[in-house]
């Protein structure tokens, strides 16, 4: 068969290939980027789905508007207002099939072959693949524990004049980094100065462990005149409620939303109306704050356990910054004491010891750091975390 040439720009996910090795009995996996299914509010979702069917079965089961189920758009606007986003109305957002579709729609509407797009290094692997599918020439901006380096970002924007800049400012995947308030404001200033679209992906912002993170870039745009029109914000219910609902949303200026809606109509007509109606009833029920509190507490305990275990079992052979939220540790092998420094080799040794993680190289659009790797603490209990990291200690060698 003669496939589309755009497929030449992407390759099979290295993470997907890794998962083929996970069938070994007794393996402990830190590889997946999933929330813990034990954290799902099954009873609340059951009640919400029943209410959706009893109160408006036609709306829940019939075809719907491409922009989204209007009651859900109303609830999502209120949800965003509760997080400091002022002056937002239901018509300022569209509902997407997970935030992944929002990113795909941005790729379809914004990227022509050869366009420059700036992403963080490292960044979400599926975003790299998605944007490359549409022919983007990706430019990588460095990240530290305070998020993207905004001085370097400005240099890259000035040099490359990108179609847009893609950031995960709050507990990024895979970096776990939290963009500082000062840098968030600088990003908004850069958007205005260079008339450059900033895409803010925020699936993890509600998963903080202690003090709440700074407001989203979208929320802060009210403080930087002229910046709101240069922000596209992607949100998701997947990490805080249920990935299976596939409910996300895109907030952007009207012209971009109209183009994205047109492309979505060609793609799936609309996000599942039953899922949207269920999410609507759940948000109306008032159960979300308690659900978030439970999830935050559990993940905070697991993150603390993983940090302690890494220090105890791997010592100076690994360097990392303790995450303040999200689902991930981002670590770097130092090679101290003659121990392994290549994360790909370390991953193979770890599988032999019965534990899995994801090497970091695929998360870089350019110049991959082969010593980095990602660990997820979300789906393992504390006992499993301690045992799994002990196995990593055996795998790291000497």
Image: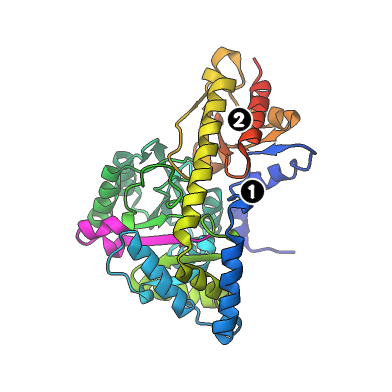
Q: Residue at x 71, y 64 (%)?
A: 2
Q: Position of residue 373 (x, y in %)?
A: 56, 34
Residue 159 in view (yes/no): yes
Q: Which residue is nearer to you in this view: 338 or 50? A: 50
Magenta part of the chain:
219-237
Q: Give the residue pinned by disc 1.
A: 13
Q: Residue at x 69, y 37 (%)?
A: 28
Q: State how far apart marks 1 and 2 are (Cα).
A: 17 Å
- Is residue 105 toward the left or the right of residue 218 in the image? right
Q: Position of residue 55 (x, y in %)?
A: 54, 83
Return the mark for residue 65: none
Q: Is residue 79 shown above or below 374?
A: below
> Considering the image in quadrants, where does the N terminus appear?
bottom right
Query: Residue 168 lies in magenta, yes or no?
Result: no
Return the mark for residue 343: 2
- Is residue 315 toward the left or the right of residue 390 in the image? left
Q: Residue at x 43, y 52 (%)?
A: 206
Label 2 sits on a secondary structure element that is helix
Residue 368 in view (yes/no): no
- Is residue 151 toward the left or the right of residue 90 in the image? left
- Is residue 255 toward the left or the right of residue 63 in the image? left
């Amino acid at each position: 068969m003669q496939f589309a040439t755009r497929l030449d720009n992407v390759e099979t996910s290295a993470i997907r290939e890794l998962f083929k090795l996970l069938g070994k009995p007794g393996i402990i996996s830190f590889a997946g980027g999933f929330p813990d299914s034990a954290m799902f509010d099954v009873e609340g979702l059951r009640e919400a789905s029943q209410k959706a069917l009893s109160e408006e079965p036609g709306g829940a089961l019939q075809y719907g508007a491409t922009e989204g189920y209007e009651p859900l758009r109303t609830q999502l606007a209120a949800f965003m207002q509760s997080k400091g986003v002022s002056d937002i109305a239901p018509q300022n957002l569209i509902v997407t099939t997970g935030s992944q579709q929002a990113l795909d729609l941005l790729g379809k509407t914004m990227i022509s072959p050869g366009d420059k797009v700036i992403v963080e290094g490292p960044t979400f692997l599926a975003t790299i693949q998605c944007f490359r599918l549409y022919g983007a020439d990706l430019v990588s901006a460095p990240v530290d524990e305070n998020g993207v380096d905004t001085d370097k970002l400005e240099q890259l924007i000035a040099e490359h004049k990108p179609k847009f800049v893609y950031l995960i400012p709050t507990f990024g995947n895979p970096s776990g980094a939290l963009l500082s308030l000062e840098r968030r404001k600088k990003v908004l200033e850069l958007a205005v100065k260079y008339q450059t679209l900033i895409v803010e992906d925020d699936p993890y912002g509600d998963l903080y462990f202690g003090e709440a993170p700074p407001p989203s870039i979208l929320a802060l745009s009210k403080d930087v005149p002229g910046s709101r029109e240069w922000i596209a914000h992607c949100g998701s219910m997947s990490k805080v409620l249920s990935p299976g609902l596939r409910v996300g949303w895109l907030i952007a200026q009207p012209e971009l939303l109209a183009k994205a809606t047109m492309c979505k109509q060609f793609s799936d007509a609309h996000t599942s109306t039953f899922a949207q109606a269920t999410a609507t009833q759940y948000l109306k029920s008032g159960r979300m704050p308690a659900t978030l509190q439970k999830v935050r507490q559990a993940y905070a305990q697991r993150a603390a356990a993983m940090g302690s275990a890494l220090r105890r079992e791997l010592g100076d052979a690994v360097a990392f910054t303790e995450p303040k939220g999200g689902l991930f540790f981002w670590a770097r092998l130092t090679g101290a004491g003659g121990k392994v420094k290549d994360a790909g080799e370390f991953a193979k040794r770890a599988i032999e010891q019965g534990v899995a993680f994801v090497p970091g190289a695929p998360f870089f659009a350019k110049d991959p750091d082969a010593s980095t790797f990602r660990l997820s603490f979300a789906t393992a209990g504390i006992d499993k975390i301690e045992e799994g990291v002990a196995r990593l200690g055996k795998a790291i060698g000497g």
